C-alpha cells in the first residue's frame, strides 16, 4: 500500500508541476461559480471573504478544470426571497453549475428546493446546520446535489459535554442563540449533559437583535451553575459574556465553535477567559489545517477565527476540487458526483492551500482520487451530504487559540456511542 | 437565452406574489386608511396555514393533514382572515401611528410564536414536507415554473378585478368616505367600525393568499420569511407605485422588486471584487435613498390615485343605495 | 425577581431618554419618526470618535472616574456628541422632513423616516464596520448588594440612572418655567395660532430637533456604556423606544419617562413569566394592553 501511495503521490507531484507550468494557458477561459452569502451581516462578511480567498488560491494554482475561476458573490440579506432570487439569477443568467451558500438554513432550504435541485446545480453550504436537510436527503429529495461542511451539531454537543465532565463541573447553565442551529444545539447538549451526569440548571434562549441581554444573563446567573455553556454568535456572545462576568458569574465557560473569534476574545478580555474552553471540529494537528492557517494569516493578518470561516474555506475548496475532478463543461450533477473522488479516505492526501490544490490537479488528471484534508480536518461526506469530523478542545491565547485536546474521528464516535 | 427566460419567469412569479400582497395592503391603507404595520403576520398566517394543512405528516409538529391543495390554500387564507378579525376587533379604533405600532407588535409576536413553538410550526427550522401540487405530472423544472406563474397571474388578475369592482361599488365609496372623514360618514348613518373591520379582514385574506402562494412556490416557510423586512418591502411597493390605485400597487411591486434584485445583480456584476463585500450595505443605502427621493419628488406615487367623482349631484343619496 | 426589577429601572433610564425626544417630535411635528433610534447610533458613534480624539490629544483625560468606566474624555465626548447629533437631526429635518412637511404630507414623513433609518444605519455600518465596538474594553464589575436574594448593581448603571434623571429634571424645568417651554406647548396645541401670537415656528421646530437629538445622543452613549455599540443598535432600540413613548402617551414628557421604565421593567420581568424565546414580544403585548384600556396612552390626550 505505501508503495502505491508513494507512486501516486510522485505522479501527482509531477503532474502538479506540469499543471503549474500550464497555468498561464489556463487563464484563457473563465468559469463562474456562484456564492449566495449574507455579506450585509457582521458575521457573514468574513465568511464571504474566506470563500473568495479559497478561489484566489485555486487561481494561483492555475484555476480549476482548465479555467480561471470567478466567484460571483450575491448578498442574501438573510432574506429568503432575496437569496432565492440571487441563486436563481446566478444559475440562469450566469450559468453557474456550483453554488456556495447560503448560511442560514432558512435561506439555504428554499434555494435547494426551488433552484438548485430543479436546476441540477450542486449546492455546497458552509454553515446551514438544520437537521431538516438530513431528512430531506433521506427522502431522496436533494438528488445528491446538496453538501455542507458544517459538521453535524451532534459532534459539537458531545464534545461540549465531555469537557464539562472532564473539568468536573456538577452543573451547567446554557445560553443559546434562538435560531435553528441554537435550538438544535440546546436540545442536544442538554441530553448529552444529562448522559454524563451534569445538571442543567437553566437553558435560556437568546434572541437576535435584543437591545439588552441582561435579563437572560440574570436568569442563567440565578440558577447558580458551576459553569456556563454558550452557543451564541460573537455579537450577542460578547454582550452576554461581558454582562455575565460583570455580574460576577463564573469564568468556567464552555464555548461552541461560533465563539472562536478574535473579536469576541478582544472585547471580553483574555484575563477573563483563562478558564474558558471551546470546542470545534477543526483539527489544528494536521499539517493541512496549519497550512490553511498560515496562508490565511498571511492574507488577512489574523487567525481564521470566527463562525464558519474554516467551513466556508472547505466548502469552496471541495467544490473547486470536485470541479477539477469532473473536468471541463461538467454538469452540476457531475460535479456533485465528483465530490466523492476528492474526499476519498483511500486517496492521496492533499493539503488545504495552493500547493495542495496543484497536487490534487495532478492526481486527478492521472485518474487517481484524493483525500482533501481541509481546514476543518479530514472532511468526509455521508450519503446525505453531511460531514463528520474529528474534534478539538481549544482555549484562547494572546495570539489566537491553542489546542488543548485532540479527539480523532474514532474517539468522537466512541464517546458519542458511550452517551447513548 | 433560455436562461434569461427561465429567470424572468421566476422573477415574475415572485413579483406577482408580492403584487397580490400589495393589493391587499392597498385595500387597507390606500382605500380605507388603515395603517397596517403588521403585514407580514397575515402573509405568514397564509403561508404557514397552507403548508401545515397541505403538507405531509412531519411528526415533530402540527400538520401533515395533506389536504387537497385548493382547500389548503383556502384554509391559509381563512387563518389570515381569522387573525385579522381578532386583531381588528382589538386595535382598529386606534389612531394611525398607534395602530401601526400595535399591528407591528402583532407581527413580532407572530414571528416569535412560530420561532419558539416547535409543536405548532416547527420552530426556527420552519415547515417543510410540503409537496408542490401536480409536481409528479409537471416535474420540477422550467415547465413547472411556467405553469405556476400562470396560476399566480390568474390569482393576481382575479384579485385585481375583484378589488377594482369593490372600489367602484358603493362599499368602495363608503371606504373612501371613512378614510377622508370618519365623522361625516358616521353622521350619514354609516357604521365606520364595522366597515373598517370588513376592509381589514378582506385585505388580510388577500395578504394570506399571497403568503400561501409564496409558501407553495418554495415548498417551505420559516420564521425568516416573516421578519419585519417584508412589511417594509410591501409598504415601499405601495408608496412608490401609488397608494389608492390598484394598478399603481401592482406596478410598484414589480418595480421595487425589480430594483431590489437588479441592484444586487448590478453590484455583483460591476462592482470590483473587494467592494462586493460591501454591496449589502450599499444596496440598503440605495433603497433607503430611493424611497426618500420618491417621497420628496413624487409623493403620491408613480401612478397616483385617480379621483373618482361618485356623485353627479342630481340623484339623492338614498337611491344610489350607498 | 428584585434583581429583575432593579435591572428594569436601570435599562429604563436610557429608554426614557430616547423616548422623550421621540415623543416631542411625534407631538409637535405629528409624525412617527422611525429614524429616531438612528440618532442614538449616530450619537454613540460620534462619541466613540470624539472619545478617541480627546484621549489621544489629552492622555490625562483617559483615566477612569472612580468605579465607573466613564472617563473625562468620554464626558467631553458626550457633550460634543450631543451637539453633533442635535445638528445632524436639524440637517436631516431640513433635507427631508421639512420639505415633506411643507407639502402637507404628514404620512409621507413616516415612510421617509423608514428610508432615512435604512440610509443612516447602513452608512454607519460602511464607515465603522459591522462588528460591535466598546468605549472601554475593561469590564466594570457589579457590586453585590445582597447575597440572598441575589442583588447586583453596576456602578455605571447607577450613574446612567442618576444622569438621566438629572437631564429629565432640567428638561422639566425648561418646559414648565421658560417662555421657550410655553411656546413649545403652544406650537404643539395649534401651530397656526402660536405663530399669530409671535412664536417663531421654524426656530421652535429646530429647538425640538436639537433637544431630541441631544437626548438621543446621551441615550446612545449610555446604551453603549451599558452594553455595546453596533451599527444595528438603532434597529434593536426603535421598538422599545416607541413602546415607551406610546405607553406613556404621545406628547407627554413625563409619560415617556414613565413609559421607559415600564418597558424596561417589563422586558426584564418577562423571563420570569414567559419562556426566554418570547421576550421580544413583551413590549408589544404591553403596548396592546395599554392601548386597549387607554387608546392614547397613560398620559396622552385624544387629538384629531
Image (spheres, coloured by chain):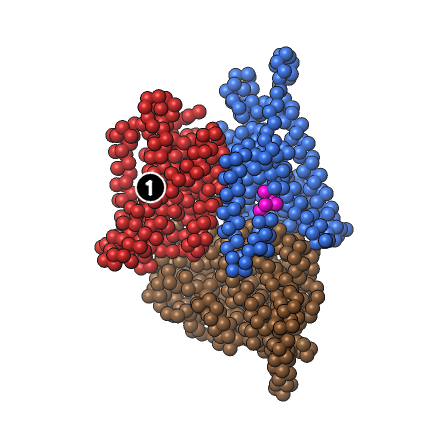
Chain colours: A brown, B blue, C red
- Location of residue C238 by image quarter: top left
The reply, left or right, for residue A369 in relation to residue C203 is right
Q: Position of residue C45 (x, y in %)?
A: 37, 50
The residue to which callout 1 is attached is C215
Residue C300 appears in the figure: yes
Give the residue displayed 61% in from the left and 34% down from the top.
B248
Name above or below for residue A122 compared with residue C207. Answer: below
Q: Position of residue A32 (x, y in %)?
A: 63, 62
Find out whether residue B259 is within the magenta segment: yes
Find out whether residue C109 is within the magenta segment: no
Residue A314 appears in the figure: no
The reply, left or right, for residue C26 in relation to residue A96 is left
Q: Position of residue A142 (x, y in %)?
A: 66, 60
Instruction: Give the magenta part as a residue range.
Output: B256-260
Give the residue displayed 56% in from the left and 19% down from the top.
B190
Name above or below for residue A154 compared with residue B245. Answer: below
The chain that hosts pointer 1 is: C
- Please, what is the dominant secondary structure of the magenta stretch? helix
Is label 1 in a helix, a strand or a loop? Answer: helix
Of residues B112 and C155, the one nearer the viewer is C155
Amino acid at each position: 500500500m505505501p508503495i502505491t501511495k508513494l507512486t501516486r503521490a510522485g505522479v501527482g507531484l509531477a503532474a502538479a508541476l506540469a499543471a503549474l507550468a500550464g497555468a498561464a494557458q489556463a487563464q484563457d477561459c473563465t468559469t463562474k461559480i456562484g456564492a449566495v452569502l449574507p455579506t450585509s451581516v457582521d458575521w457573514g462578511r468574513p465568511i464571504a471573504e474566506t470563500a473568495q480567498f479559497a478561489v484566489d488560491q485555486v487561481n494561483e494554482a492555475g484555476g480549476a478544470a482548465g479555467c480561471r475561476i470567478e466567484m460571483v458573490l450575491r448578498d442574501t440579506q438573510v432574506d429568503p426571497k432575496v437569496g432565492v432570487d440571487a441563486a436563481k439569477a446566478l444559475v440562469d443568467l450566469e450559468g453557474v453549475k456550483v453554488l456556495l451558500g447560503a448560511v442560514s438554513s432558512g435561506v439555504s432550504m428554499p434555494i435547494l428546493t426551488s433552484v438548485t435541485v430543479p436546476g441540477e446545480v450542486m449546492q455546497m453550504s458552509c454553515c446551514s446546520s438544520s437537521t431538516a436537510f438530513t431528512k430531506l436527503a433521506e427522502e431522496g429529495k436533494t438528488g445528491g446535489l446538496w453538501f455542507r461542511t458544517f459538521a453535524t451539531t451532534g459532534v459539537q454537543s458531545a464534545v461540549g459535554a465531555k469537557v464539562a465532565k472532564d473539568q468536573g463541573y456538577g452543573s451547567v447553565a446554557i445560553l443559546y442563540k434562538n435560531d435553528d442551529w441554537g435550538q438544535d444545539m440546546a436540545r442536544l447538549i442538554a441530553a448529552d449533559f444529562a448522559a454524563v451526569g451534569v445538571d442543567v440548571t437553566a437553558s435560556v434562549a437568546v434572541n437576535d437583535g435584543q437591545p439588552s441581554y441582561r435579563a437572560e444573563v440574570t436568569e442563567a446567573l440565578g440558577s447558580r451553575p458551576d459553569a456556563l455553556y454558550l452557543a451564541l454568535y460573537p455579537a450577542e456572545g460578547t454582550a452576554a459574556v461581558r454582562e455575565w462576568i460583570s455580574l460576577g458569574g463564573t469564568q468556567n465557560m464552555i464555548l461552541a465553535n461560533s465563539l472562536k473569534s478574535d473579536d469576541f476574545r478582544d472585547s471580553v478580555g483574555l484575563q477573563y477567559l483563562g478558564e474558558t474552553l471551546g470546542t470545534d471540529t477543526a483539527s489544528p494537528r494536521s499539517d493541512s489545517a496549519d497550512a490553511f492557517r498560515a496562508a490565511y494569516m498571511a492574507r488577512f493578518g489574523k487567525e481564521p477565527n470566527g463562525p464558519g470561516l474554516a467551513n466556508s474555506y472547505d466548502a469552496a475548496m471541495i467544490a473547486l476540487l470536485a470541479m477539477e475532478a469532473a473536468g471541463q463543461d461538467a454538469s452540476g450533477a457531475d460535479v456533485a458526483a465528483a465530490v466523492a473522488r476528492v474526499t476519498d479516505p483511500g486517496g492521496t492526501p492533499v493539503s488545504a492551500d495552493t500547493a495542495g490544490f496543484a497536487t490534487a490537479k495532478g492526481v486527478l488528471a492521472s485518474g487517481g482520487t484524493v483525500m482533501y484534508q481541509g481546514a476543518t480536518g479530514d472532511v468526509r461526506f455521508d450519503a446525505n451530504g453531511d460531514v463528520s469530523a474529528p474534534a478539538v478542545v481549544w482555549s484562547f491565547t494572546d495570539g489566537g487559540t491553542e489546542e488543548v485536546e485532540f479527539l480523532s474521528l474514532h474517539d468522537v464516535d466512541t464517546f458519542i456511542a458511550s452517551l447513548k | 437565452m433560455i436562461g434569461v427566460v427561465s429567470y424572468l419567469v421566476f422573477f415574475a412569479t415572485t413579483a406577482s406574489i408580492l403584487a397580490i400582497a400589495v393589493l391587499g395592503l392597498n385595500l387597507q391603507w390606500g382605500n380605507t386608511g388603515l395603517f397596517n404595520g403588521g403585514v407580514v403576520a397575515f402573509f405568514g398566517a397564509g403561508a404557514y396555514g397552507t403548508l401545515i394543512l397541505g403538507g405531509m405528516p412531519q411528526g415533530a409538529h402540527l400538520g401533515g393533514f395533506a389536504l387537497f391543495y385548493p382547500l389548503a390554500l383556502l384554509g391559509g387564507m381563512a387563518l389570515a382572515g381569522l387573525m385579522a378579525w381578532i386583531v381588528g376587533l382589538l386595535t382598529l379604533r386606534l389612531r394611525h401611528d398607534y395602530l401601526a405600532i400595535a399591528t407591528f407588535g402583532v407581527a413580532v409576536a407572530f414571528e416569535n410564536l412560530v420561532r419558539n413553538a416547535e409543536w405548532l410550526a416547527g420552530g426556527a427550522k420552519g415547515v417543510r414536507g410540503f409537496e408542490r401540487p401536480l409536481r409528479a405530472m409537471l416535474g420540477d423544472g422550467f415547465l413547472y415554473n411556467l405553469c405556476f406563474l400562470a396560476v399566480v397571474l390568474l390569482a393576481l388578475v382575479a384579485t385585481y378585478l375583484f378589488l377594482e369592482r369593490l372600489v367602484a361599488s358603493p362599499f368602495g365609496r363608503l371606504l373612501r368616505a371613512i378614510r377622508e372623514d370618519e365623522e361625516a360618514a358616521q353622521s350619514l348613518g354609516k357604521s365606520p367600525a364595522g366597515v373598517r373591520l370588513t376592509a381589514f379582514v378582506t385585505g388580510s385574506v388577500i395578504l394570506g393568499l399571497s403568503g400561501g402562494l409564496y409558501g407553495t412556490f418554495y415548498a417551505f416557510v420559516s420564521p425568516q420569511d416573516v421578519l419585519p423586512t417584508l412589511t417594509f418591502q410591501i409598504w415601499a411597493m405601495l408608496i412608490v407605485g401609488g397608494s389608492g390605485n390598484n394598478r399603481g400597487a401592482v406596478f410598484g411591486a414589480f418595480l421595487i422588486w425589480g430594483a431590489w434584485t437588479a441592484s444586487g445583480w448590478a453590484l455583483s456584476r460591476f462592482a470590483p471584487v473587494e467592494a462586493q463585500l460591501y454591496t449589502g450595505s450599499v444596496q440598503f443605502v440605495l433603497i433607503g435613498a430611493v424611497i426618500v427621493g420618491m417621497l420628496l419628488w413624487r409623493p403620491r406615487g408613480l401612478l397616483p390615485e385617480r379621483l373618482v367623482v361618485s356623485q353627479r349631484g342630481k340623484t339623492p343619496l338614498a337611491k344610489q343605495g350607498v | 425577581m428584585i434583581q429583575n426589577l432593579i435591572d428594569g429601572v436601570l435599562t429604563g433610564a436610557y429608554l426614557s431618554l430616547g423616548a422623550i425626544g421621540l415623543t416631542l417630535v411625534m407631538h409637535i411635528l405629528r409624525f412617527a419618526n422611525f429614524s429616531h433610534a438612528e440618532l442614538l447610533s449616530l450619537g454613540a458613534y460620534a462619541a466613540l470618535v470624539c472619545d478617541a480624539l480627546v484621549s489621544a490629544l489629552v492622555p490625562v483625560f483617559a483615566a477612569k472616574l472612580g468605579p465607573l468606566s466613564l472617563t473625562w474624555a468620554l464626558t467631553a465626548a458626550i457633550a460634543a456628541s450631543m451637539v453633533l447629533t442635535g445638528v445632524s437631526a436639524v440637517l436631516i429635518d431640513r433635507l427631508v422632513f421639512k420639505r415633506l412637511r411643507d407639502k402637507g404630507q404628514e404620512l409621507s414623513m413616516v415612510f421617509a423616516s423608514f428610508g432615512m433609518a435604512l440610509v443612516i444605519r447602513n452608512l454607519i455600518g460602511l464607515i465603522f464596520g459591522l462588528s460591535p465596538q466598546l468605549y472601554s474594553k475593561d469590564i466594570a464589575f457589579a457590586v453585590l448588594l445582597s447575597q440572598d436574594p441575589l442583588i447586583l448593581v453596576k456602578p455605571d448603571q447607577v450613574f446612567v440612572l442618576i444622569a438621566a434623571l438629572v437631564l429629565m429634571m432640567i428638561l422639566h424645568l425648561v418646559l414648565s418655567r421658560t417662555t421657550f417651554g410655553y411656546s413649545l406647548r403652544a406650537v404643539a396645541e395649534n401651530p397656526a395660532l402660536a405663530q399669530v401670537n409671535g412664536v417663531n415656528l421654524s426656530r421652535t421646530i429646530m429647538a425640538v430637533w436639537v433637544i431630541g437629538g441631544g437626548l438621543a445622543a446621551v441615550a446612545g452613549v449610555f446604551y453603549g456604556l451599558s452594553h455595546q455599540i453596533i451599527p444595528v443598535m438603532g434597529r434593536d432600540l426603535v421598538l422599545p423606544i416607541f413602546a415607551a413613548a406610546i405607553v406613556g402617551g404621545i406628547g407627554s414628557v413625563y409619560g415617556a419617562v414613565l413609559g421607559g421604565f415600564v418597558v424596561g421593567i417589563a422586558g426584564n420581568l418577562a423571563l420570569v413569566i414567559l419562556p426566554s424565546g418570547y421576550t421580544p414580544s413583551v413590549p408589544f403585548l404591553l403596548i396592546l394592553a395599554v392601548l386597549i384600556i387607554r387608546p392614547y396612552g397613560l398620559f396622552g390626550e385624544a387629538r384629531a
